[in-house]
Amino acid sequence: TGPDAMLGADVGSPPLPVASMDQLNLLDALHLLKSVEGERSSINMEPLTQLFSDAHDIGYALSEDRTNHLEVPCPPPPCMANLTFDQLCDEIWECLPRGEPLCRQSQPKSTAHDGPSTLRGGCMVVTSAASDMLLLRQVSPTVGGCQGRRSDMLWCQEHEARGKRIEQKRALAVQHNRCHDAVPSPRSVRKVALSDFIGAVACRPPPERVDFFDRRLMRMRQGLFRIHGILQSLQRLSGRSATLDKLIVLYKERYDLAEWQKEVFDVVMKHREDLMRWAPSSTSTGVDPD
């Protein structure tokens, strides 16, 4: 009577597209540097304890479950309390370009839950009686020659439709760390953002895709302009650092508006109708011949 498959969860640094976390990382970086400069924040941090006590999606700018974290800087960890301006700039440089959370460690093990789930991360255990689940190929939706990310959710949904029972288990949570990852190129960041967009839309049932497509596209555009606003605020800081200047240059290249329009927004609009009609084919959801 137990589950056929048990899923883990990624804790620590979520393996999400860098572009979906940069806005919040930059917001926290700006707040930290302004605090060091002696500019007292107008935000009373005490009431925020409850907001950030729930780690769900606090580092993810495209969350479908919450938006109350988008303009609120996260309280810094104690290890940053006594750092100088230059030391903070160095810490920011080590975290942000790779997508490592600066203040918002995501999904601590205490919040990884036991119960039904379609979000596979960390590791997975399949019972011997349900070993046929491993024969199902993981779907990677493709429209107009553009490939979306491989979808854990579609894999889980297909198995649930076949009567399999899937649950997440807190004990299978795995610590994920991005601090040693290579810094992605600006084009790579845009390519991954496009792939994630296609995959996220394809995961939704067809009746929900139009609304999700429009909502996600609007959120991405808003986030892009917000990032440019934060970069302008960073440039206006009275403190200067070669590391901070390097960070600003990197992010201006990463979030070049013309390149995002050409490589992401124009592409998804061109293939919008194809994405609305997309469905897993018999080869993508069938038994992998290998």
Image: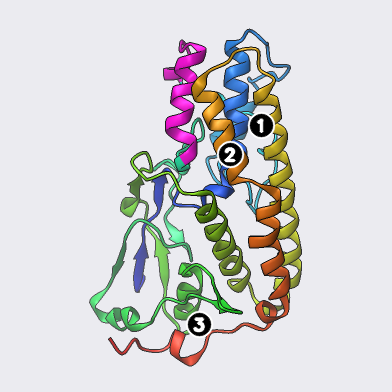
Q: Which residue is denoted by mark 3 in the rendering?
A: 161
Query: Which quarter of the rendering shows the N terminus?
Result: bottom left
Q: Name the residue: 76% across, 64% down.
A: 214
Figure check: 58 above or below 157: above
Percent x, y of residue 242: 51, 21
Disc 1 versus disc 3: distance between alpha carbons? Answer: 46 Å
Dot 2: element: helix
Tell which circle, 1 or 2, labels the residue nearer the N-terminal end.
1
Percent x, y of residue 68: 70, 39
Disc 1 versus disc 2: distance between alpha carbons? Answer: 8 Å
Disc 2 versus disc 3: distance between alpha carbons? Answer: 43 Å
Asked whether residue 2 appears in the rendered view, the answer is no
218 or 252: nearer the viewer: 252
Q: Residue furthest top?
A: 38
Tell which circle, 2 or 3, labels the residue nearer the N-terminal end.
3
Label 2 neighbour load within 10 Å: few <14, some 14-19, many 20+: some
Tell which circle, 1 or 3, labels the residue nearer the N-terminal end.
3
Are the residues tagged 1 and 2 within 8 Å (C-beta)? Answer: yes
Percent x, y of residue 195: 55, 65
Please tell me whether mark 2 or mark 3 is closer to you in this view: 2
Q: Main secondary structure of the magenta part?
A: helix
Q: Which residue is denoted by mark 1 in the rendering?
A: 231
Q: Which residue is denoted by mark 2 in the rendering?
A: 251
The colour scheme of the drawn protein is rainbow
Percent x, y of residue 259: 65, 54
Dot 3: element: helix
User: Residue 25's quadrant in the figure?
Assistant: top right
